[in-house]
């Protein structure tokens, strides 16, 4: 009997030890904003006016801020699908929202980031817009999708407004807005007791258009004080036809905004919506910092891609230039007292290496000791989290397609040398971003840049092989999942 009792006690001790060890594993708080460009970083080449985003900036100052992060695609679905599946657009064939992701064999075989954490024993919880069009619902213990706030009763509110292309004060109390409610749900999870480590994701729809937020956020930006981005007349004169075609759907809207004298008002609305989402991010981060999980929770904040507000005669995203491809990415890996974990770079470190959102999956896998995978595109950022100047193949790739032919990929490479864009018919662009940070002058035909052009061409991956379509029966099965 005594032996049995002793054995039982040993078993209890073992279980308690395992449980304690599980609780000591690093949690992850994964925060995503939609269509948020680099303005909160103080990027003077993009925007020199007032931006109110103190909570995002505070997070950047508490961890490592990757100021040269780029989206795998400048469109919602392919970007989110890429960083959450670990499969790049040029391997999946998923370049645009129009493509059916259940046709992609690489995506069919992929394991989502949530799935990797679930397999490792984590509780996986997602609120809002995290993925878009591709997900593996079985990998979430709890998942609440995103929804847009209803339009004000008198929408459109602007003389140029149509559908998404509108802005103005919302008719809802802030407490009833979807972004606020998503933050509330996330905060509630941070206040709960968890018996397992958690992967907790929250995706905010803002500042995606339409820009409907409470009046108080507009009031933060008196219209007379709002600056507009620097624009160049005839900026597309040296852009090849396929590049110009990407702007065709939005160029009319740009002209309408300019002709109506509403450029400053539109920029004000974008800034107001940015301030709103920053407030919700701040509420979540405050809840984490006041919770028992603050010292063992990795925080990742990112935007899925950038955003044009008139630059290159374009509005929104879906181009291969800096405005649409450059995004936000920051990590905080804490130790007790919210100091950086041992061996990691000091709080407030800025890393200027060129990285991709594609690198998030392998980075979190390395930080949280997930099962090693050899099918992930991207690279672990762990060396840069420890030393921002560590040796690094400093290159970021972004892929896109024309909606008219969504399975043919265009691609751009961005590094310290500049930007190179290749379209599917051999049309090209080359920009010397060191001397031309706004990418106003395409130097692809300038003999002085022939050596640079050759080096940039060599940096591109092979995009000629499209994803193998799945059999029709399998496509139908996955469409039902």
Image (cartoon, rainbow, N blue to C red):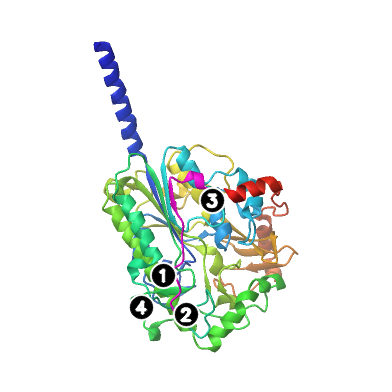
Disc 2/disc 1 C-alpha distance (Å): 20 Å
Q: Nearer the viewer, mark 3 or mark 2?
A: 2
Q: Residue at 41% x, 68% y: name it.
A: 40
Label ID, residue 274: 1
Q: Nearer the viewer, mark 2 or mark 1?
A: 2
Q: To which residue does mark 4 refer? A: 215
Is 152 a magenta residue?
yes
Query: Marks 3 and 1: CB-CB under 8 Å?
Result: no
- Residue 72 visible within the image: no
Secondary structure at badge 3 equals: loop
Q: Residue at 33% x, 50% y: name it.
A: 189
Q: Vertically, is 194 above or below 88?
A: above
Number of other residues with Cα within 10 Å of mark 3, as a class: few under 14, some 14 to 19, many 20 or more: many
Q: To which residue does mark 3 refer? A: 135
Give the magenta part as a residue range: 137-156
Disc 3/disc 1 C-alpha distance (Å): 27 Å
Residue 415 x, y percent position in the rendering: 57, 60
């Amino acid at each position: 009997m005594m032996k049995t009792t002793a054995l039982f006690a040993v078993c209890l001790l073992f279980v308690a030890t395992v449980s304690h060890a599980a609780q000591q594993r690093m949690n992850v708080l994964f925060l995503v904003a939609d269509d948020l460009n680099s303005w909160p970083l103080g990027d003077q080449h993009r925007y020199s006016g007032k931006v109110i985003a103190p909570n995002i900036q505070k997070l950047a100052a508490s961890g490592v801020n990757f100021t040269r992060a780029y989206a795998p695609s400048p469109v919602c679905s392919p970007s989110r699908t890429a960083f959450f599946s670990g499969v790049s657009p040029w391997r999946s064939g998923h370049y645009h929202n129009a493509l059916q992701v259940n046709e992609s064999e690489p995506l069919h075989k992929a394991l989502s980031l949530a799935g990797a954490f679930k397999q490792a024993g984590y509780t996986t919880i997602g609120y809002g817009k995290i993925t878009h069009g591709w997900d593996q619902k079985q990998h979430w213990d709890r998942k609440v999708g995103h929804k847009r706030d209803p339009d004000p009763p008198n929408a459109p509110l602007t003389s140029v407004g149509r559908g998404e292309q509108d802005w103005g004060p919302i008719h809802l109390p802030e407490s009833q807005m979807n972004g606020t409610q998503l933050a509330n749900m996330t905060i509630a999870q941070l206040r709960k007791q968890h018996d397992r480590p958690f992967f907790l994701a929250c995706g905010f729809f803002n500042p995606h258009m339409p820009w409907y937020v409470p009046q108080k956020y507009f009031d933060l930006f008196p219209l007379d004080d709002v600056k507009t981005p620097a624009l160049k007349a005839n900026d597309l004169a040296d852009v090849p036809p396929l590049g110009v075609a990407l702007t065709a759907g939005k160029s009319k809207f740009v002209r309408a905004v300019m002709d109506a004298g509403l450029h400053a008002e539109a920029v004000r609305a974008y800034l107001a919506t940015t301030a709103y989402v920053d407030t919700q991010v701040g509420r979540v981060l405050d809840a984490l910092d006041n919770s028992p999980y603050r010292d063992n929770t990795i925080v990742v904040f990112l935007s899925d891609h950038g955003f044009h507000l008139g630059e290159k005669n374009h509005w929104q995203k879906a181009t291969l230039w800096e405005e649409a491809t450059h995004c936000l990415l920051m990590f905080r890996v804490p130790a007790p007292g919210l100091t950086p974990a041992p061996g990691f770079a000091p709080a407030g470190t800025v890393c200027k290496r060129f990285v991709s959102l594609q690198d998030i999956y392998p980075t979190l896998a390395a930080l949280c000791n997930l099962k090693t995978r050899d099918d992930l595109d991207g690279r672990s950022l762990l060396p840069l989290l420890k030393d921002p100047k560590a040796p690094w193949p400093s290159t970021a790739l972004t892929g896109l397609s024309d909606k008219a032919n969504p399975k043919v990929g265009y691609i751009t490479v961005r590094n310290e040398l500049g930007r190179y864009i290749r379209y599917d018919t051999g049309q090209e662009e080359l920009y010397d971003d060191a001397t031309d940070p706004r990418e106003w002058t395409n130097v692809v035909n300038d003999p002085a840049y022939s050596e640079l052009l050759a080096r940039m061409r060599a940096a591109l991956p092979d995009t000629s092989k499209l994803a193998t379509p799945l059999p029709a029966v399998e496509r139908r099965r996955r469409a039902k999942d």
